[in-house]
Image (cartoon, grey):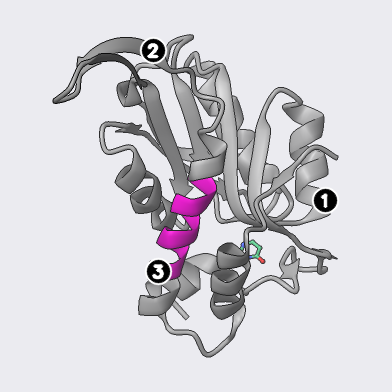
Amino acid sequence: MKVNVVDHPLIRHKLTIMRKKDTGPKEFRELLKEITLLIAYEATRHIELYETEIETPLEKTKGYFFNDKDVVIVPILRAGLGMSDGILQLLPNASVGHVGIYRDPKSLQPIEYYAKLPTLSDSSHIFVLDPMLATGVSSVKAIDIVKEHGGKNIILVTLISSPEGVFYVNKFHPDVIIYTASLDRELNSKGYILPGLGDAGDRLFRTK
Ligand code: URA
């Protein structure tokens, strides 16, 4: 099973507050944004830097920069929206695509109901955002869509992952690197992650 668990003490502390059932939407949203920013710090470690020459007040020296215009974030609607701001705070020039997927109640197949992506190229660094990697069905479908649009370098960023979800994504997209704050125990019979934090979308948007 290939997954990078970013278990910095700050992340574990903040995630613990998010998991508590009494944590309200304001704090939940703020913490999701903060944790996403912290995971993104790790998940962007591989991005290549370009060399440049700059002048300090004292002398010329070498400097480094990367092109954050090459970064594309793709939140999966709707809970993925709660992660966008965290990455955009770090990479304000990133482009944002959106993908909406639901599960057909009869066939149980994932169905795309919305996809709007910026132009993708070989140099795009694409971060697909989904707080809860549960069965992995939505993530795999979202990654399919990104690849159909020409995306190649894809990282899946999640808050909590299940072993089943990681296995499923690894199986269909072995090239995709997963970053998560926690690998939880298992899925229950309804597809919720245990111990998890419940329905991330409902907790973000107070829909239950
Ligand atoms: N989606 C959620 O929001 N929570 C889960 O536990 C599983 C899927």
Above or below, comparing residue 55 to residue 26 in the picture: above
Residue type indicated by callout 2? Tyr
Nearer the observer: mark 1 or 2; the answer is 2
Dot 1: few (<14), some (14–19), or many (≥20) neighbours within 10 Å? Answer: some
Residue type indicated by callout 1? Glu
Does the magenta run of residues contain 193? Answer: no
Circles 1 and 2: CB distance less than 8 Å? no
Residue on which disc 3 sits: 29
Cα–Cα span, label 1 and label 2: 38 Å
Residue type indicated by callout 3? Arg
Residue extent of the magenta highlight = 30-40
Residue 15 in sight here:
yes
The percent position of residue 150, horizontal first and vertical second, equals 49, 13
Does the magenta run of residues contain 33? Answer: yes
For residue 42, side relative to residue 86 (left or right): right
Residue on which disc 1 sits: 164
208 and 67: which one is in front?
Answer: 67
Q: Tag 1, which secondary structure?
A: helix
Residue on which disc 2 sits: 50
